[in-house]
Image (spheres, rainbow, N blue to C red):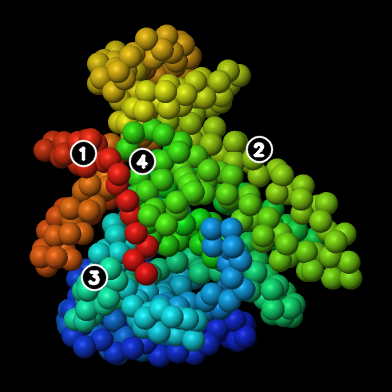
Amino acid sequence: MIRIRFDHSYQRDLPDACIAVAPETPPAPALLYWNAPLAEELGITLGDTDDAMVARLFSGAELPEGAEPVAQAYAGHQFGGFSPTLGDGRALLLGEVLDPQGRRYDLAFKGSGRTPFSRRGDGKAAVGPMLRELVIGEAMHALGIPTTRALAVVATGERILRERALPGAVLTRVAASHIRVGTFQFFAAHGDHETLQALADYTIARHYPELAGSKTPYLALLEAACERQAALIARWMHAGFIHGVMNTDNMTLSGETIDYGPCAFMDAYDSATVFSSIDREGRYAYGNQPLIAPWNLARLAEALLVLMAPDDPASAVPAATEVIQGFAACYRRHWLVQATRKLGLTAEREGDAGLADDWVALLAAAHADHTLAWRHLADAAEGDAAPLTALFADAAQLNAWLPRWRARLAEEPGSVQDSAARMRAANPLYIPRNHLVEEALLAASAHDDLAPLLRLLEVVRAPYTFRPGLDRYALPPVPELAEGYRTFCGT
């Protein structure tokens, strides 16, 4: 018997923020993947439950004991246009899981059928996009980037219609919570200030308990959310990660990455890189991510104004504006902390910011492979610059920068080998390269072959550790595979 310690504080404290909905019953559920390490972290035990029953419990055919599925309400700016009512159109919150340390996580289905928020959608999901969410989420977790994760992926045994008929699937997602900027926008837009305040108080209690005694808790909530998002986006940028749909309904108050639809990792460095097939104007391009984040947070600020100053919301605008305008400096601080580590430096000193900026300018000018360039700095630290130089068609500027960096590195405590070891622990060798992800998803979706996906998962779960025989997982694609690469939402 499977055991899950369920609680339902969201439904209990915010009854007007969700609607009870039962998942649709799939015709032939079959377990594709069970994330045993994550289940152990959550304190979920299977006991003698076999794969067939796990598939039933995590597809909607049956429900784990204690689950109370609801669809959550939210709004959102999607590519700049506001939709006052979006909500969980193909997702259901089953409840919250309390792990052995008492930490609270949401457990939610994705792809389990229509809800009152589905509009014209079928509420379903396909095998490929759900497995993409599994792989990217696990890779992000291994990279130390706050993220939602997949507990299970179950094939439903039905075909769903997208551009063509595809095998259906349900994913079970684990998140610190599913509270979004768009959740606040929903109640602000509908004039429900009572629920808006309850939501803000709930968010503070769940994610920012240190703010409970603040004299200005809602301004403090905005400040804290900005801090977490700045740290998150800085980590995205250093990983070369491009989310692809940074709509306000995809920005969490927990500071986790959520919704791995048309996401991808950048190979050759280019700030204008866009992979999403629906981002035709490049709104969410790699280099725009630090600019979109404060735009989204400004929408959160707008929703919170009425709580900051109930009698005169406009009077709260200057303080909220100051917080949003401070995002750039906050992001820069987090970015430099990461850059310092990746350059092998133990603490930032005067001149290090310029050193880091000049390095990134080199990558941009050469369109060098983002992941390998950072990784090969460790080799260059030990005296072998050949792997790094090979990434640059013209290494003249690189050769002018390297002595500056080595001189700075020489000021660090310990040996050169110590510095190189620090760098290899901060710069991954293996990321989920787009061509490898597509290869694995095609095998799983079209040929029922999970072996490439399982192998890729094994590799990206240890991104910093060199292992012989894994060269193809470290190398960028041949140009013909990279050119014109596009990703899709899967909805």
Which of labels 2 and 4 is toward the front? 4
Residue sitting at x 22%, y 53%? 438
Q: Which residue is mark 2?
A: 329
- Mark 1: amino acid: Glu
Query: Residue drawn 25% across and 19% down?
Result: 390
Rounded to the nearest angstrom, the CA distance separating label 2 from label 4 is: 25 Å
User: Mark 4 Cα within 10 Å, few/some/many (few <14, many 20+)?
Assistant: many
Quarter of the rendering containing residue 446: bottom left
Residue at disc 2, secondary structure: helix
Q: Earlier in the sequence, mark 4 or mark 3?
A: 3
The first of marks 2 and 4 along the sequence is 4
Identify the mark nearer the N-term, 1 or 4.
4
Determine which of the numbered discs, if any, sits on residue 266 in the image: 4
Residues at marks 3 and 1, CA–CA distance in whole angstroms: 25 Å
Q: Secondary structure at mark 4?
A: loop
Q: Which residue is mark 3?
A: 164
**As drawn, is 375 to the left or to the right of 447?**
right
Between label 2 and label 3, give the one nearer the viewer: 3
198 or 409, which lies in front?
A: 198
Q: Give the crowd class for mark 3: few <14, some 14-19, many >=20 residues within 10 Å.
A: few
In the rendered view of the protein, which quadrant contains the C terminus? bottom left
Where does the N terminus fall, quadrant-wise?
bottom left
Seen at 33% across and 78% down, the residue is 124
Q: Residue at x 61, y 66 (%)?
A: 82
450 horizontally vs 148: left or right:
left
Instruction: Please state the horizontal and vertical placement of residue 39, each as a whole percent of the image.
Output: 31, 69
